[in-house]
Amino acid sequence: MDTSFLLFLHSLLRYAVLITVAGAGLMHLRGFIGQHPILNGERTLAIVAMVLCHVQLVLGLILYAMNYETYEHMRGTIGRFWKMEHLGTMVIAILLVTLGRMLSKRAKVERSKQLRVAVFYLIALALILWAIPWPGTEVGHGRGWL
Ligand code: HEM
């Protein structure tokens, strides 16, 4: 199977992941600071962000598995980026999002629900931003914004 369509989807989905993870993290932080209760829309956004992260994880794993040989033979900065940094950091970030949502569900007090999503999602956001091969960087050389 051709990987270019999957790569396009994976590339496009980064923006949906970034917007929803950032949106949910910031809204929960705002609620925590302002001591407002969680709104239904905010909770839904946190769930949508988690689901999109899981879809992105599946797409990424398929892409990696389909070109496993290529990545295994890559050396230097680029090889390390694809084998360790992109994969490892993204898996950790997605785990953090999942954990943030799970712990938030379990918390008894409204404010700790908000704080858990805010902290876990915003740390995940920073990791995701760092591990994306942005155009203009060494690892993103030759890639575009999409
Ligand atoms: C939130 C999570 C993730 C985001 C935002 C993300 C984002 C990206 C982006 C922007 C690209 C470059 C696409 C392009 O230039 O067309 C890419 C490529 C790729 N990603 Fe991810 N990714 C994520 C998670 C993962 C995970 C968990 C894996 C698992 C192995 C993975 C594997 C790959 C692979 C194999 C490529 C293709 C590299 C190549 O072009 O040879 N990604 N990803």
Image: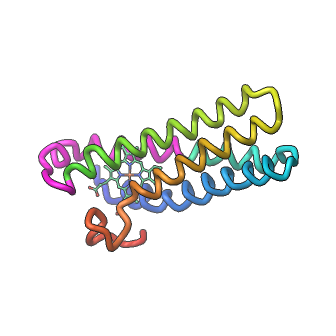
Residue at the spot 76% in from the left edge and 49% down from the top edge: 42
Residue 43 left/right relative to 130: right
Choose top left, top right, bottom left or bottom right for residue 140.
Answer: bottom left
Residue at the spot 53% in from the left edge and 62% down from the top edge: 15
Residue 93: percent from the left, percent from the top?
48, 43
Residue 52 left/right relative to 41: left
Relative to 17, does residue 55 appear above or below in the rendering? above
Q: Nearer the viewer, residue 103 or 61?
A: 103
Q: Nearer the viewer, residue 87 or 37?
A: 37
Relative to 47, does residue 132 appear above or below in the rendering? below
Residue 43 left/right relative to 71: right
The scheme the figure's colours follow is rainbow
The magenta stretch spans residue 87: no
Q: Residue furthest right?
A: 36
- From which residue to which does the magenta span run? 53-78
Residue at the spot 70% in from the left edge and 33% down from the top edge: 104
Relative to 138, does residue 102 appear above or below in the rendering? above
**Magenta portion: prevailing SS class:** helix
The magenta stretch spans residue 62: yes
Q: Residue furthest front?
A: 33
Q: Nearer the viewer, residue 49 or 129?
A: 129
Residue 73: percent from the left, percent from the top?
12, 46
Residue 75: percent from the left, percent from the top?
13, 51
Quadrant in which the C terminus appears = bottom left
Residue 125: percent from the left, percent from the top?
54, 52
Residue at the spot 39% in from the left edge and 54% down from the top edge: 131
